[in-house]
Amino acid sequence: MDVQVALRDVTRSFDTVDGPKLHALGPLSLDLRKGEFFSVVGPSGCGKSTLLEIIAGLSPVTAGEVSFEGGAVRGEVPEGIGVVFQEDASFPWLSVRDNIAFGLRRRGMTTGDVRQRVDRALSLVGLRDFANAYPAQLSGGMRQRVCMARTLVLEPRLILLDEPFGALDQQTRLLMGDEVLALWRATGATVLLITHSLDEAALLSDRVGVMSARPGRFLDIIETNWPRERDSRLASEVDFGKVTSRLWLLLRDESMKSMGKAAPSTVSA
Amino acid sequence: MKLATKIRLAAIVAFLVAVELLCRTALISRFTLIPPSEMATGLARILWAGKTNGEIATTLSGIAMAAACSIAVGFLLGAVLHSWPRARASLDPLLATYYSIPIFVFYPLFIVFFGMNRTPIVVIGFLFAVVAMMTNTLNGLDRVPRVLLKTARVLRLRRARTTLLIVLPSAAPHIFGGAKLAIAYSFVGVLGAEFILSSTGVGYQIAFAFNNFDNVQMYSLILFVVIVVATVNSALFAWERALLQRRGQW
């Protein structure tokens, strides 16, 4: 399979106010295959979001190399990458329709083409009836869908999702997960999802990268072997439980490390 | 009409009726206060006679000039300071204590600089207003969510477009709040300077009437100022509410 994103020995350190540099990430290497759904899980503060920002070109690397479709990622976001952030990034001064059309208009498309693509995106994320509403009139989940539509309408080849459902309740998360899977199949884009939910990662992904406590490195990359046609009903299957158990066993000690606790050596029955 | 508006109007009418009765029954002496109805008829007479129209035009144009300059300069200085953290760190203590400086005392200095004309009055109005606009611009720019700036980068917007399409709309409520304050402070600065220091304008006419015990003239002009200020502020308030309602911040 074609490699779309390649990370080679990437590390990221941050300057601190009056101490040594904070080693946040790496060294790590990763190949993202074209069209796959890849999730990253890891303990809090392990550098998941930093990893996403490095791939997007929003944050520089301290050492190592990042490439997207063969071109080096340096200083700016390459064309073809879309990002949906955890925080609400809808523009409160624009209607839903104008939010979604924002990127298209900057590309100099005709009004007719913009309208057509926005209508399609509105249908895709189920917001057709709210086209003229303003973000303040929508729920948190609907606003995330606006951001999702604003990203999808530009037809990115790589979609980076930084805990986009973090603020939603469990039921809404499952349904949003189904929507993301449907969108992923419809667009054929590669998806990288950052999440702290093991269930979400296990349910949505072709592969799940499990990261260590800071400085974040990949402990393992687990193949789920799910069919491309899948949805949240997968959660009731035995294999789903096996994947989440495996993820948890890998993450348990790391999570305790990140909380400053020693990992117990035995598991009680 | 909303219930809150009805209550507000009823309170104003009740207050005016009470003052009218207190004045008419001589519980309040005419040397202290004249009935509101006399203020209104006095104002109509003044406006109809047209003798003070020139003074009114002078004052309103001075306020408009002070407000326009303070909004433009305050916004520009706020934007410059926001993008220049070192200068901001140096000026922050000055900005924080700015309104403790009695600007009127610099009037003689302004006369030396600008001459015996309207300019020193407008400068006082400007100086009253400009820092409010500056600090509100800074507040607005500080509060642009980082995620929106990241979104601008993801959408590959250049700096000018990011400023125009993301930063300014995001900061608009604060900038608008600054403009509202700047207009209010321009009224205070110009009218106050006219009252104390000038020999022209509505402020001076009020002071002149006060010194000559001409209560009808004085209260009529005070009523005029109150009406103008209330009208301008109501219009700005309605505009701000429409702006914020759209964003769910009202």
Image (cartoon, coloured by chain):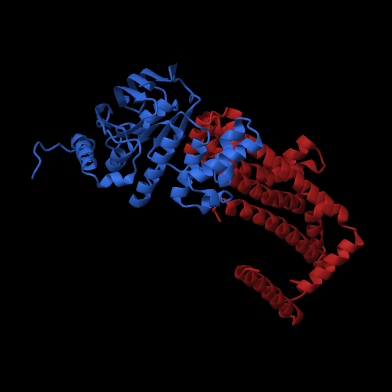
Chain colours: A blue, B red
B167 and A19: which is toward the camera: B167
Which residue is rendered at x = 69% and y = 49% of the image?
B183
Which image quarter holds the C terminus of chain A?
A: top left
A169 and B14: which is toward the camera: A169
Q: Position of residue A238 (x, y in %)?
A: 21, 43
Q: Quadrant of residue B21?
A: bottom right
A85 and A82: which is toward the camera: A82
Position of B173 relative to B35 (above/below): above
Numbered circles on residues, count: 0
B36 and B213: which is toward the camera: B36
Position of A95 relative to B217 (above/below): above
Q: Quadrant of residue B56?
A: bottom right
For this view, does B177 lie left or right of residue A86? right
Q: Position of residue B250 (x, y in %)?
A: 56, 56
Q: Quadrant of residue B37?
A: bottom right
Which image quarter holds the N terminus of chain A?
A: top left
The answer to whether residue A91 of the structure is visible from this angle is yes
Position of A21 relative to B147 (above/below): above
Q: Residue furthest bottom?
A: B25
Position of B214 relative to B18 (above/below): above
Which residue is rendered at x = 80% and y = 65% of the image?
B220
Which residue is rendered at x = 71% and y = 75% of the image?
B19
The answer to whether residue B163 of the structure is visible from this angle is no
Q: Position of residue A256 (x, y in %)?
A: 20, 38
For this view, does B140 lie left or right of residue A58? right
Which residue is rendered at x = 66% and y = 74% of the image?
B10
Q: Position of residue B31 (x, y in %)?
A: 77, 72
